[in-house]
Amino acid sequence: MSSFWKQLAPSLMILLCGFVCAQAQDEKPSLILKGDRPLVVDEVTESSDGYWYKRGNVTTFIDRERVVRVEYPKPPAAAEAPEPLEGKGKWQLADAQKVQDFFIAKFKKPLPLTAFGQSDLHTRWGLDHRNGMDVGLHPDSVEGRALIEFLRNESIPFLAFRGPVPGVATGPHIHIGNRSPRVSGR
Ligand SMILES: [Zn+2]
């Protein structure tokens, strides 16, 4: 009986590895390229003119013009939940510096803010955004995940959008602050 298991063990290991490796493949981000097959990568970070991606030990830059979009693997629960990820707590815009300090210390670059306080777009949408700020990071990106973890640890409220929500979000981003109240009269 024991020799039977000894013979079987190596093939079980291979089977298991094959399964685990295939699983891991699904959990990686991919770059959707213009006129080319999607590129599955280990990590991707966005910069102003393109993307840095890592495969194994090699980090490569790809021009923004060649990339249609970046797709991040969704955690299984997220696939079914259309609602944005939400963190609760107390917040005022004066606390923004704490978040910016965390980001620059961790990623050696400033927090990519797309809105700080009220913006024209928020006004047009009838949202009171005076106490909110928006960060142009996908919630499933390396930087987005680190930011969300920080916000959770600090009990800072946020809403993380994986895609556009009509009248609320133009695309993936992380809103820091409580939900923006609708301005009355709309
Ligand atoms: Zn916002």
Image: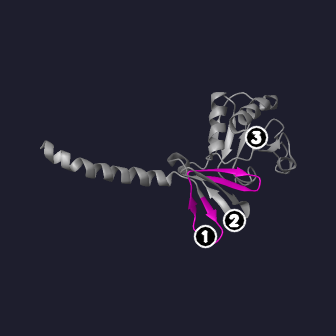
Q: Is residue 148 above or below residue 37?
A: above
- x, y percent for residue 141: 63, 47
Residue type of the residue flagged with mark 3 = Leu
Q: Residue 106 bears which disc, if any? A: none
Residue type of the residue flagged with mark 1 = Asp
The answer to whether mark 2 and mark 3 are in CB contact below 8 A is no
Q: Residue at x 78, y 32 (%)?
A: 96
Q: Residue at x 71, y 61 (%)?
A: 63
Q: Main secondary structure of the magenta part?
A: strand
Which residue is disc 2 drawn over? 66
Is residue 8 within the magenta segment? no
Q: In the rendered structure, which disc, 2 or 3, sits on the residue that comes first in sequence? A: 2
- Residue occupying the far bottom of the picture: 35
- x, y percent for residue 61: 67, 56
Q: Which quarter of the picture shows residue 179?
A: top right
Q: Is residue 85 above or below residue 95?
A: below
**Residue 80 in sight:** yes
- Residue occupying the far left of the picture: 1
Secondary element under disc 1, as helix, strand or loop, is: loop
Which residue is disc 3 drawn over? 111
Mark 1 neighbour density, 10 Å: few (under 14) some (14–19) many (20 or more): few
Residues at marks 3 and 1, CA–CA distance in whole angstroms: 31 Å
Mark 3 neighbour density, 10 Å: few (under 14) some (14–19) many (20 or more): some
Q: Where are the magenta residues, as a range?
A: 31-53
